[in-house]
């Protein structure tokens, strides 16, 4: 006779920003399989968000979908209020929405810098700032930021991206201490290369993917599902004594702390 492991996630309400594709989509489906109801936002890809909603519903869970620009405070507040109206609470927030663009210092425009900061860092602030009061009301919450190995090692020609992700590590550690008294845990998952739409353009360059794989000790670029697993782990009761941590998920390519 075997016994399943109780992750403590059944019935939890999860909000995932940028949940229509990639890591967000994979996390939404894995949370649904763990018994959670899921909410997600999209900016332009309504059809993709609809597919995720349908997949979650096929798993027997509820899925809320919001059209929201994550860097727009009104949109974020409306999204959180939509979750409150439907569920009365948000148990888990996954700050996943982000962009990765090319920017050479000395030639980078301020608008490019601002766009990256507004979405990758500002969007995290807006969502977290809106959700924390609701979590405090229920004396429970888990917040998980999605960062990058670029936050630790830097990334040439993507300094704006690396800077935005590095800021999330400081935010994680600060909020972990600030919110612990309210039974709210805050952690970050920092992936390396992942096989998502964000990387599809560079992977289309002949030989580039092989070059990347050669830098990873496990010799593979993981699918989004390999990042979703650690996200769900950190949200579960298996990680109930973990807060303020950066969980690097990169196949051994960057072996240093965050």
Image: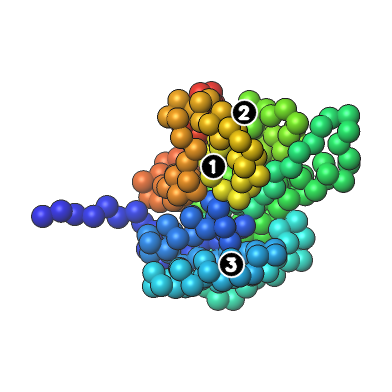
* CA–CA distance in space, label 2 to label 3: 31 Å
* CA–CA distance in space, label 1 to label 2: 17 Å
- Residue at 56% x, 71% y is 50
- Residue at 44% x, 44% y is 226
- Point out the tag, 1 or 2, that comes first from the N-terminus: 2
Viewer-proximal residue among 121 and 222:
222
Are there few (<14), some (14-19), or many (20+) residues within 10 Å of tag 2?
many
User: Is mark 3 in CB contact (under 8 Å) with mark 1?
Assistant: no
* Placement of 158 over or under 121, stated as above or below: above
Across and down, in percent, residue 200 comes to 61, 46
Mark 1 lies on residue: 194
Of helix, strand and loop, which one carries label 2?
helix
- Point out the tag, 2 or 3, that comes first from the N-terminus: 3
Q: In the displayed structure, does residue 209 sit left or right of residue 67?
A: left
- The part of the image, by quadrant, that contains residue 165 is top right
Where the N terminus falls, by quadrant?
bottom left
Mark 3 lies on residue: 49
The image's colour scheme reads: rainbow
- Is residue 231 something that shows in the picture? no
Are there few (<14), some (14-19), or many (20+) residues within 10 Å of tag 1?
many
Viewer-proximal residue among 50 and 241:
50
Of helix, strand and loop, which one carries label 1?
loop
Of circles 1 and 2, the one toward us is: 1
* CA–CA distance in space, label 3 to label 1: 20 Å
* Placement of 35 over or under 165, stated as above or below: below
- Point out the tag, 3 or 1, that comes first from the N-terminus: 3
Mark 2 lies on residue: 152
- Residue at 55% x, 76% y is 86
- The part of the image, by quadrant, that contains residue 203 is top right
User: Is mark 2 in CB contact (under 8 Å) with mark 3?
Assistant: no
Of helix, strand and loop, which one carries label 3?
helix
């Amino acid at each position: 006779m075997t016994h399943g492991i109780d992750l403590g996630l059944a019935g939890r309400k999860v909000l995932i920003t940028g949940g229509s594709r990639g890591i967000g989509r994979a996390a939404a489906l894995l949370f649904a399989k763990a018994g959670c109801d899921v909410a997600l936002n999209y900016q332009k890809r309504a059809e993709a968000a609809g597919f995720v909603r349908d997949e979650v519903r096929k798993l027997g869970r509820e899925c809320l979908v919001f059209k929201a620009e994550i860097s727009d405070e009104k949109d974020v507040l409306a999204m959180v209020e939509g979750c409150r109206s439907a569920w009365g609470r948000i148990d888990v927030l996954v700050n996943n929405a982000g962009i990765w663009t090319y920017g050479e210092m000395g030639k980078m425009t301020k608008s490019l810098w601002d766009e990256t900061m507004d979405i990758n860092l500002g969007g995290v602030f807006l969502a977290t700032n809106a959700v924390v009061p609701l979590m405090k009301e229920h004396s429970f919450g888990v917040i998980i930021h999605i960062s990058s190995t670029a936050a630790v090692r830097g990334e040439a020609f993507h300094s704006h991206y690396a800077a935005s992700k590095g800021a999330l590590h400081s935010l994680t550690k600060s909020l972990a201490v600030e919110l612990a008294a309210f039974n709210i845990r805050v952690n970050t998952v920092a992936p390396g290369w992942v096989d998502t739409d964000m990387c599809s353009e560079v992977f289309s360059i002949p030989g580039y993917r092989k070059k990347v794989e050669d830098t990873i000790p496990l010799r593979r670029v993981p699918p989004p599902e390999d990042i979703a697993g650690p996200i769900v782990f950190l949200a579960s009761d298996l990680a109930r004594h973990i807060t303020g941590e950066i969980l690097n998920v990169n196949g051994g390519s960057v072996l240093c702390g965050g």
